Image (cartoon, rainbow, N blue to C red):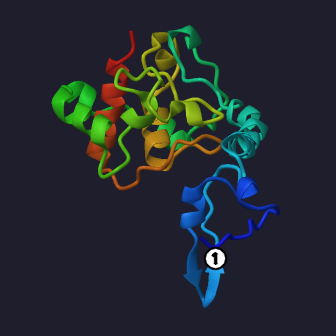
Amino acid sequence: MREFACPYGGGLSACGSLRQIKSRRWRYGKLQAVTSPGKCGMSYSHMRRALLLPLLLFLPAACTTAPPSSQADCPQSRSTPTAPAEFLALQNPQAQQGLDTNRARRIFESGSGDSGCVFCHGKTGAGDGVLAGKYSVPPRNFSCAATMQALPDGQLFWAIREGVAGTAMPAHAQLSDEELWLLVGYVRSLAK
């Protein structure tokens, strides 16, 4: 049997097992070594260390995001922009007509497309959705009655329609006024 030289120096014993030697193959007219982790290359422990080091360096940055809101954040202190005066004076017309809760819940949970409120605000509106922990400013906690009483209907309508600067709240201008008012009524119904 022909002995192959290990690219890392030494003979057969430095290069590893017979299986590793048999895994050599011809490529581009030359004999190429097909190495696997073991004696003839980077060991598994070295690979783990090499992969773990970047993770440990960036882990503190990943932990700086705010935790999701909860009932402990009630009332929730926020300093978000105030809606223009023409919006602040608006009252929810759905309040007099009665809220279509099923339709409002469907909009809250699925939105119009891929932007359902539930992903950030959570199913109960507590600001604990699956994406809530990814934002430096936590989503609004709709389940806190003290927070919700301080917000006029027009402020909620404007925030949903236009989005909120300085937060992850996107604009939902694709929703009709009727759908926006349904959402305003629905998030108010989540307050306890």
Decide: is 153 above or below 176: above
In x, y percent, where is residue 9? 82, 63
Q: In the image, 188: left or right of 33?
A: left
Q: Residue furthest bottom?
A: 29
In front of the other: 24 or 88 = 24
| Residue 176, x across and y down, in percent | 30, 50
Q: Mark 1 falls on what kind of element?
A: strand
Please identify the quadrant where the N terminus is shown.
bottom right
Q: Nearer the viewer, residue 158 or 112?
A: 112
User: Please, what is the three-letter code of the amino acid marked with disc 1?
Assistant: Gln
Residue drawn at x 45%, y 20% as measured from the top left: 126
Residue displayed at 64% across by 25% down: 78
Q: Horizontal and vertical percent for residue 26?
A: 57, 82
The image shows residue 60, relative to residue 188, as above or below, that is: below
Up-down: is 150 above or below 33? Answer: above
User: Which quadrant would the C terminus be assigned to in this image?
Assistant: top left
The answer to whether residue 90 of the structure is visible from this angle is: no
Relative to residue 155, is residue 50 drawn left or right? right
Q: Quadrant of residue 81?
A: top right
Q: Dot 1, crowdedness within 10 Å: few (<14), some or many (≥20)? A: few
Vertical arrangement, residue 65 with respect to residue 14, above or below: above
Number of numbered markers: 1
Q: Which residue is mark 1?
A: 32
- Residue at image coords 63%, 80%: 31
Residue 62 can be seen, yes or no:
yes
Question: In the picture provided, is 177 more to the left or to the right than 57?
Answer: left
Please provide percent x and percent y for residue 131.
Answer: 49, 36
